[in-house]
Image: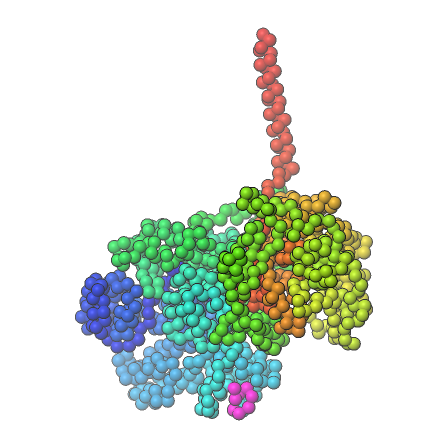
Amino acid sequence: MKSIAPLVLTWMFLVAVVFAQDPGCCHRVRTHPACQESCDQMALEASAAGRRQHLSNLRNNCPMTLTTFWQCVNTSAPDIWQEDTGWPGRQCCINARAGQCHAACMQASSFSETSSACLRHEEPSLFQCLDRFEKKEDCCRHAPVASQCRQKCEAIFDASTPTEEMSLDVSINCRSNGQTVIQCVENYTLVAIPARDPRDSLHCCERSHSSACKEICRRAHINLTSERDIVDSLLEACGPIQPHEGIWNCFFLNSGSQIAQDSPLPNPSAMDGAKLQCCQRAVSAKCREICVKLYSTSWSTKQSWNNFDEHCQYQPMEVSLLTCLADVQEPCQPGCSGLTYCTNFNNRPTDLFRSCSARSDGGAANDMQLWSEGSIHMPFMNIPVLDIAECESEMWKAIACTLQVKPCHPESHVNMICKADCIHILSRCIDHSRLTKGLTALGLCNILSPADRHAPCIPLTEYLGEMTPLFQPTDAGARENKNDEMTVPCHSDPCNNETTGFSGVCSINRGLCGYGQTCTQAKCTPGCRLGDASTFLVTRGSHVRLPESADNLACYKACTCSVNGILEHCQPLQCETMEPCTHNGQRREHGSHYKISCNHCVCFNGVETCSRRQCPINLDAHPDASQHYSTLPCKCTDQYVPVCGANGRTYPSACTAKCAADLEDNQSEFGTCDSFDNPCADNPCQADERCVVRRQVCLSINYADCPQYECIGASRHCSREPRATVCDTDGKEHFNLCTLHRRGKTLDYLGPCQARCNAVNQRQVCGQNGETYHSECAAWSDRTIIDYFGPCRAVGKRTENTTAQQCSSVKCPDPSVPHCIGATPPGACCPVCAAYTRVLYSKGEADRAAAAFGNKAVSVAEVLKGLRTIVAVAECDLYGYLSVEGDIVISVMSTIPSPSKTQIIACNKEAEKLGALINTRSPMVVSYMYLSPLLAASTTMVRTQIVPTAAAHTVSSSLGVLLVCGIMVIVLQRFSCGNR
């Protein structure tokens, strides 16, 4: 499904019902003389065709804010819309769940146009209705237009659930017209499409003991809409019908069959657990209530989308809710190219878009065609405009394309058009002669754009011209394609989630590549939906959180996505209190981000979490001082006397351990963590398991230990385990850890073996995390960027944005990317060409996550693993560590040894994207239990610079010599003239 664009959509007004126009409707608008006059003229017409001739005047003179009036008209004179639609299937559009599908349906003029814009497996109710009308045309066209046969035939298709009496009426009244109509209707009633959503019965599939039956059952209920087709599929896979047993009994109960004595309880998992999380972001109670109804077990009524438009979609204050829903439905992805209409959006490989596709491109062209008729239709409002071909035509095109292609604001992911642009175009192009009295450009833009002029928005000026150039010169003088410098493996939907259903979670298959290599292949990991009504998938084996029920969105449950593709072992979590925080008498709301002095802070469930920078004494007197810290947090010195914390992290001193991690004296020991005894020495694993040293750093150890080992099952069938290539200390590769241990080898590092890290080439390195590794590959496999060569022996004092070397006792590597101005992250010594995002996290949430799954502490490695799958660009990879200030540093760096400017910018944008998802607590992040503690983020991006080539340097030198020679000639000439 596609998310609803938050600006102008060409939707019709309100759905019509039955009767002939009631003149009493006109009396209701006596305070609007022009509207009443238009209404009276329409009421005098006896025929529907005559009434339709007055529709245009009625639209212009009667604003859609006259809700009662329009409801009266729609109820008493529905025929006024029929010629306007020209297509009977438009009556079905109210059943569309997704806003963009609804809009496309309203604009369509045929079944095929709707089918190309909406996905059948996502819109079962819509296609059930459309199938009825298509069958109606096919069957009833054989009967004379004004005959009883035609009337009875159409009646059976107009009913959502035909009855036996209706079928009998057709048999009686159509005998004289031959058997064609009767047979066609009988074929339809035999396989009558149910009014209910087949996915409401998905939970019944789990009643079967056969895995094949379960899988066919799930596919049938997701992809099919006819009960006959579903039953045929089940008979083939699950055996004959046994009404009182297992899976069949569940279906009969759920369908409301006469075999059921009582109505079944709603299926608790038949909700959209991802979008329900978004409903909590709604500002108004009314919008929140509507949102919950849409995405909970009680699926939307026919009026619910209209209510959502009125109270949520066209309310700028609900931008947080709308952005959250869009993130679930259409995540922001980098790059846009190949558009034939919205060409100004092409050649932007590093920008983020929600819907860069041929479908959106065509939708923008259709919008422009409709707007050219002089009116922009919106729910409850019409905006009359001048000829858009003559008035700001390029800006109108930019608006149409922005609404369809949906560029994302880099920091917040909103895609609302800026208020200044809205005011600019409406003040110039509104047709004031047709504008409803009292409305102004400013008033309209208050509805269509963010209320705050400084709020994040999409400026149209970015898309008023084509991006230049597509090709850019290289150092060698050749021309290279910027789009070819980036690979986004999941951009083309390789898992076919949009076409064949929910096949798997797409991510980059980085397991195929080693250190310094770029993986360009995608992999599809089987997943579970967050509720039967959800299209949002989480990977199998992951621990997730979702609302426990629609009754209280502050209460969550923790579940495991099982190998069977369903959520199992669910247990309630402690409800969020959503209490505010108080600092120095100042109230801070739950979820708010703010600064105290130089520190970033966030309030979550009444607990204030802040970064721990050592701020200058008088920050007000030195406003730039926040960029130049001279000491470590808590005024700790930079003397390097390492200690190992109980959380598994090596700190440069006992002072930083106490300050950053709140560790007590008895929770740290002098020495680096890797210098202590082998954690497997005491053989802590079971008899049928093997202990593997696996160093990890944990976010919280209040209620859970942080073991430095892992127990691996000693299976005899290692080939049945997932492939995860590992390298042993002899430089030999193995299929997975199981294979390595079966062969009696010792793990060196994860991933394929690299020649640069063999025994001959091995050399110690210090990671940015302050840990010493015996090789580069060991550091990279631990998701750590190398700080410098040799064992760790220093700590960087300045912990804010800096591009300079921080440690005098360390020799930093030469810059590997000359045209990149690197950044030095907190606690590190050397700058590196990698953007980084600093993340504040909640120890309380980390404790809750640990308690939910057997008191297993949340590790930094698990956080990095989860966030790594969100990085969409193959030429960028993710690394990170727990910093000396207690926050998590997430770095995104190019996998290319000498990345281009485009690739560096792409990795910057990926880091920024992660920050935006964390700051908005997007379900893409917090649906995963081990990512739910992440609260707030701030991103530092690296810059590029122009580095003169050797040829340019030679030319520059030559010009300098010529200039000096010229000056000498002039001086000598003047000197000789002076001596004459």
Queried whether the magenta region covers residue 244, the answer comes back as yes
Quadrant in the picture for residue 886: bottom right
Q: Which residues are magenta?
A: 243-250
Q: Is residue 556 visible?
A: yes
Residue pictured at 53% horizontal, 83% vertical? 204
Between 534 and 192, the residue placed more toward the observer is 534
Apparent side of residue 470 relative to residue 394 in the rendered image (left or right): right
In the image, residue 445 lies at what x, y percent?
36, 56
Between 694 and 53, the residue placed more toward the observer is 694
Quadrant in the picture for residue 116: bottom left
Queried whether the magenta region covers residue 106, the answer comes back as no
In the image, residue 629 lies at what x, y percent?
62, 46
Residue pictured at 58% horizontal, 62% vertical? 934
Between 890 and 188, the residue placed more toward the observer is 890
Q: Main secondary structure of the magenta part?
A: helix
Apparent side of residue 732 relative to residue 138 in the rendered image (left or right): right
